[in-house]
Amino acid sequence: MTQENLMQNDSQQVLSIDGLSIGFSRKDLALGKTVVEPVTHGVDLSIHKGETLALVGESGSGKSVTANAILKLLPKGSANYLAGSIHFDGIDMLKCSERKLRGIRGGRIGMIFQEPMVSLNPLHKIGKQLVETLAIHRGMRQRKAEEYAVTWLEKVGIRNPKQKINAYPHELSGGERQRVMIAMALINEPELLIADEPTTALDVSVQAQILDLLKSLQAEMGMAMLFITHDLSIVKRIADTVAVMKDGRLVEKGECQALFNNPQHEYTQTLINSDPKGEPVPVAQDSEKLLSVDELKVWFPITGGLFKRTIDHVKAVTDMAFELKKGHSIGLVGESGSGKSTTGMAILQLVNSEGSINYQGNELQGLDRKAMLPYRHKMQVVFQDPFSALNPRMSVAQVIGEGVVVHKNLSDHELDDSICEVMKEVGLDPDTRHRYPNEFSGGQRQRIAIARALILKPEFILLDEPTSSLDRTVQAQVLDLLKSLQSKYGLTYLFISHDLHVVKSLCHYTIVMKGGEIVEQGETAMLFSQPKESYTQTLVSLS
């Protein structure tokens, strides 16, 4: 849809945001009163029927705040709508009753959230959550709703949908959970879809499928879409118009191709030129072996019948084998559900497995919780989703210092000094240590997660998609941070990612996985320049 078409179809405007300014209340201890800090300033946006507007900008720029304001999903106690209006199909959303909003949310306006593990109910199976939204908004009966839910799971690319519909969120991979969120948002065929980083957890091949699916459904239903992302390659592929945000303000708006061809604002130019660059940290090839994995197998039993006997297995990982030297980085890549994260969890003894896991000459398989404790501070993890990985009831200081309390005997003063020191090291202001995770941007939360791992001075860190939820500029900063820490402390990384640009920048060696098995492996530069297997070739061509 061109800008000229949009001007001609002004009557088909689905959403308009005019002069929207939002602030959050917080207690100022120095002043002894509550103050309101503005986070967005005079935002103006409009979306027409069938149009895709991409809202881009770095973490903390106000993209998600603006999107959540449309459905009044911001925290009631602290969010303040300071100025402006939001109209959807003529309805004033900021003055809309809660009852009327409930009818619009999930029905006329669908939303795909950035962090599916937070959004999905961990106590209910996937099927129940999909059926519930069909019952509320379309009045479907149980059996018909279940059949419809299976159809949608298949549409969004989930393998074995009849089996997965009976799974709980924690039993799915990160990418699978994101696809469930997409199905949940689209299942009621909304007029407007708000997609907040909907493909961050997906590998490039599935990402391409999801984008094609969204575009085809949009064409079929005439659906408008507000697409929030940090990945400019996606913006090029899916957007009609683009709005760029920085520090809560719109700095540039325009037709997609024109904006990419001739960006006017300096910040837009920075975003366009911020793809991951550089080479892995130089390492000695004769470094001693830190970790070796051999014939690793993780099969999850499928039970059935009256006595819940094992009738089959989900073969998450089969015959995994590799060696990792001190100070080196290995990248694990492959589609979601390929066994990447399961491999990492097995190495950390967080899921049951078979085979050999040898760390510094010591076999970890079969060790009980007490016997594993001495290895815990040496082997740390940074998870994909920093929001769900950080306890929202704990301050940042408590989150970062929690492991130290378990593994070391420090005084309160020594602990506080250690927390301040590690926060400085990862680029965080120590004065913010008494705040809570929800008061930080996505990039800042990931730095908190890195600080929590780093404070124990580990030798090995499992990095499970640590940059997938971050925009490109912040992603580059986090990558630079990981490299500098690796160079300074000789850290060893097992890096799980679907973003081959990031893997190429950080990892010395790469293993490609599919269906729980190794497809191809080798030195990263060689593997990417001369992939031998067709699956690897496909991944490289789509990156």
Image (cartoon, helix red, strand yellow):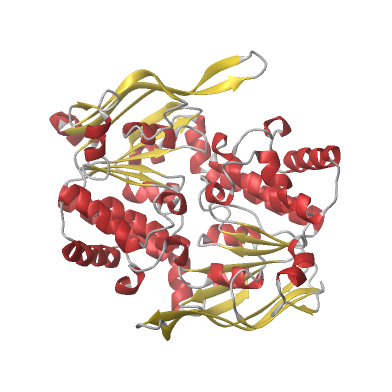
User: Where is the N terminus found, in terms of image quarters?
Assistant: top left
Q: Residue at x 44, y 78 (%)?
A: 534
Q: Is residue 14 left or right of residue 79?
A: left
Query: In the displayed structure, does residue 302 sit left or right of residue 463?
Result: left
Q: Is residue 543 visible?
A: no
Residue 523, how many percent across, how many down? Answer: 64, 73
Left or right relative to 290: residue 295: left
Dividing the picture into quadrants, the one containing residue 313 is bottom left
Q: Which one is in front, 541 or 220?
A: 220
* Vertical relation: 314 (above or below) 74: below
Residue visible at 46% across and 54% down in the picture: 117
Residue 523 versus residue 218 in the image, above or below: below
Image quadrant where residue 229 sits:
top left
Is 165 in front, or is 256? 165
Is 398 or 89 nearer to us in this picture?
398
Where residue 170 appears, as percent x and y from the top left, is: 47, 62
| Residue 88 can be seen in this image | yes
Residue at 70% across, 49% down = 452
Total numbered labels placed on residues in the image? 0
Question: Residue 275: where, in percent of width, then height?
Answer: 54, 49
Identify the residue at horizontal 38%, vertical 59% (top origin): 124
Q: Could you say where residue 341 lies in the image, as x and y percent from the top left?
A: 55, 67
225 sits to left or right of 123: left
